[in-house]
Image (cartoon, rainbow, N blue to C red):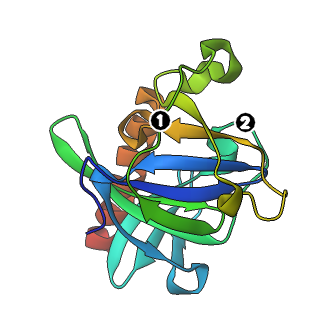
Amino acid sequence: MIGGTDLRLFVECHGFTCALEARAIDRLVLPEEVREVNAGVVPVVEVTGVRFVTFNLGRLLGLSPTDGAYILMRLTYAGTELRVALETGQCLLVAPPVDTTPFPAAMFRSRRKAIIGAFAVADGLRGGGRRAAVGLAIDVAELLTVQERDAAVRSLKGIYESAVTR
């Protein structure tokens, strides 16, 4: 398990560096370790025999899809555990939190609660200038909307029910 509330996982999302709270994160995997099970409304993937719903960080932030790694995490929803494989860009490092400043809520309207601040990206994380000087601090527990979580639960439930009826 990566997480504790005192650590952040820094990942690439196009030109941004995103710092994700690590408390719900179990591990990181490469795309070749992930097998697609179902490409439904919320796709389901499998990693070492465990099924996860999958979302793409780029798409969640209103950008084009990202690729390069998957973050496996567990979110609590409706009294149960929801396993999520979040597809991101390259994972950069795990480190203590950085100082953040409030981020204008209007910038990411659909993810207002998830974007908890902005931070100055250290030169060493800027990828030779490929990434912006300002990064996004993200609370993974707030990243998915209620509608997305409901759809994710239905997708996983549908996979299990179809496996039982075969």
What's the residue at 79%, 49% (across, down)?
64
Residue 47 coordinates in the image, percent (x, y)? 41, 79
Q: Which mark is residue 99?
A: 1
According to the picture, the residue beneath numbered tag 2 turns out to be: 62
* Viewer-nearest residue: 101 or 4: 101
Q: Is residue 136 left or right of residue 63?
A: left
What's the residue at 72%, 36% (across, down)?
62
Secondary element type, mark 1:
loop
Which quarter of the rendering shows the C terminus?
bottom left
Which quarter of the rendering shows the N terminus?
bottom left
N-term-proximal mark, 1 vs 2: 2
Examine the rendered structure and indicate whether residue 103 appears above or below residue 28. above
Q: Is residue 149 left or right of residue 120?
A: left
* Viewer-nearest residue: 138 or 51: 138
Residue 93 coordinates in the image, percent (x, y)? 51, 66
Q: Which mark is residue 107?
A: none
Q: Residue flagged by tag 1: what amino acid is it? A: Asp
Q: Residue flagged by tag 2: what amino acid is it? A: Gly
Q: Are marks 1 and 2 in contact (CB under 8 Å)?
A: no
Residue 139 coordinates in the image, percent (x, y)? 42, 37
* Viewer-nearest residue: 28 or 76: 28
Q: Is residue 44 left or right of residue 82?
A: right
What's the residue at 59%, 79% (across, down)?
31
Residue 141 coordinates in the image, percent (x, y)? 35, 39
What's the residue at 32%, 72% (across, down)?
163
Q: Is residue 45 left or right of residue 128?
A: left
Examine the rendered structure and indicate whether residue 72 appears above or below residue 97. below
Mark in the foreground, 1 or 2? 1
